Amino acid sequence: TGMVTYDAGFVNTASCKSAITYIDGDAGILRYRGYPIEQLAEKSSYLEVSYLLIYGELPTATELAAFEDRIRRHTMLHEDLKAFFNGFPRDAHPMPVLSSAVSALSTFYQDSLDIHDQEQIDLSTVRLLAKLPTIAAYAHKKSVGQPFLYPDNSLSLTENFLRMSFGFPAEPYELDPTIVKALDLLLILHADHEQNCSTSTVRLVGSSQANLYASVSSGIHALSGPLHGGANQAVLEMLGRIQNADYDVKTFMDKVKNKEDGVRLMGFGHRVYKNYDPRAAIIKKTADEIIAKLGGDDEMLDIAKGLEEIALNDDYFIERKLYPNVDFYTGLIYKAMGFPTKMFTVLFALGRAPGWIAQWREMMEDPETKIGRPRQVYVGATERDYQEIGSR
Ligand code: CMC
């Protein structure tokens, strides 16, 4: 009741109160639970950051060890869930495979669906964090026709994921500490970003009291679009087209500025950041280091840097305050690590999982939470009479 305000895309509408992530888009500041992203990137680990986001405080050494141990004991998938992967076509995109498998978790773990029982919520939290890397690695293995590997619980979550993604059952897998560290860092940088499209989706679905798996599965679908997480794949495809000389940089940039066929400079721009995305600053540095160490695609990195330089000095981008976002350089790092382009957005989803879980839990605990139900401004036909089919 009362007056309905129209806010397309919720540009100015706060849908909740949250104590998890703070962003100052004009200053380019990002903090999880008050801690600057730069400090967490340098000093923390993915599971420690997950704990921080979900439980609100950095864990003590004992708490972290207990959390890691608990997660470790839930990394395997039910054999019947494993069979699920064979139902998809070989060339399936791994994002819908991921969201389908997460959705299916609510059929395998019906014991942890009670959203009013804190212990069950903790159990589904752990199950989801532990099983996502296994699901993601299986989605990858399936797409390349290689055998699945069971998790090896002597490894950390990130190490395990790399081994299950790239190892073979017949031979030992040698972990590259450079890759482990870089992947862990990227997961930290993606871990939460307050009320973005996928997180808002998780909250909206959860606001009907749908369970955690159902809500996160919906969030994964929201993430898949090219304007959101799918941008990391779109950036690499864009760089590839320029590298293959489908068009040169200037022609491409002219297309972007003239908004020809809706072409955008992918990996640029952000709803909230009107300054350099602090995550992109860290990632750009990492891309340089990783590509130098692993011998990645220098040429593509040069194209990306060239595009950035043009954009940062061009009135079109300056006037609109468009800067590189988190997705601009990540693909080049994932590529250097050996991931196929199709897996990039899955890696984003792995990183974002603790944020989705933390936000879902915060919403469930908030006494002010109501079912999400936006209003509309109706612009359709006024009342009119039904016409018999013969007289239309
Ligand atoms: N290339 C060219 N022009 C752009 C771009 C871009 N990447 N981004 C925004 N603009 C223009 C847009 O055309 C509009 O111009 P005008 O005022 O003349 O109509 C102006 O800048 C404002 O853009 P908007 O679409 O109103 O901004 P938004 O807040 O609705 O959209 C965005 C934000 C991220 C969807 C958009 O910047 C975009 O499409 N970027 C490319 C896709 C991308 O990189 N997405 C990843 C986002 S970051 C992390 C994540 O969620 O994955």
Image (cartoon, rainbow, N blue to C red):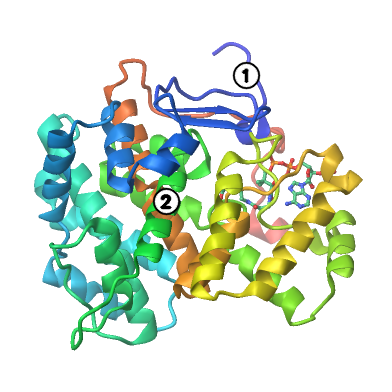
Q: Quadrant of the N terminus?
A: top right
- Is ligand 1 within 8 Å of the beta carbon of the residue shown at mark 2? no
Crowd class of label 2 (few under 14; some 14 to 19; many from 20; radius 10 Å)? many
Q: Quadrant of the C terminus?
A: bottom right
Of helix, strand and loop, which one carries label 2?
helix
**Residue lying farthest top?**
2
Q: In the rendered image, which residue does mark 1 sit on?
A: 4
Q: Residue at x 10, y 55 (%)?
A: 73
CA distance separating discs 2 and 1: 43 Å
Say which amino acid is labelled 1: Val
Up-down relation of residue 262 to residue 112 (above or below): below
Q: Specify the quadrant of the image occupied by residue 343.
A: bottom left
Of helix, strand and loop, which one carries label 1?
loop
> Which residue occupies the foreground of this view, 289 or 337?
289
Q: How many marks?
A: 2
Q: In the rendered image, which residue does mark 2 sit on?
A: 185
Up-down relation of residue 124 to residue 365 (above or below): below
Up-down relation of residue 224 to residue 280 (above or below): below
Q: Residue at x 20, y 72 (%)?
A: 82
> Which residue occupies the foreground of this view, 387 or 373?
373
- In percent of width and height, residue 131 lies at 22, 58
Say which amino acid is labelled 2: Leu
Q: Residue at x 86, y 48 (%)?
A: 313
Q: Specify the quadrant of the image occupied by residue 247.
A: bottom right
- In percent of width and height, residue 81 lies at 19, 68
Q: Is residue 374 left or right of residue 265?
A: left
- In percent of width and height, residue 144 lies at 38, 84
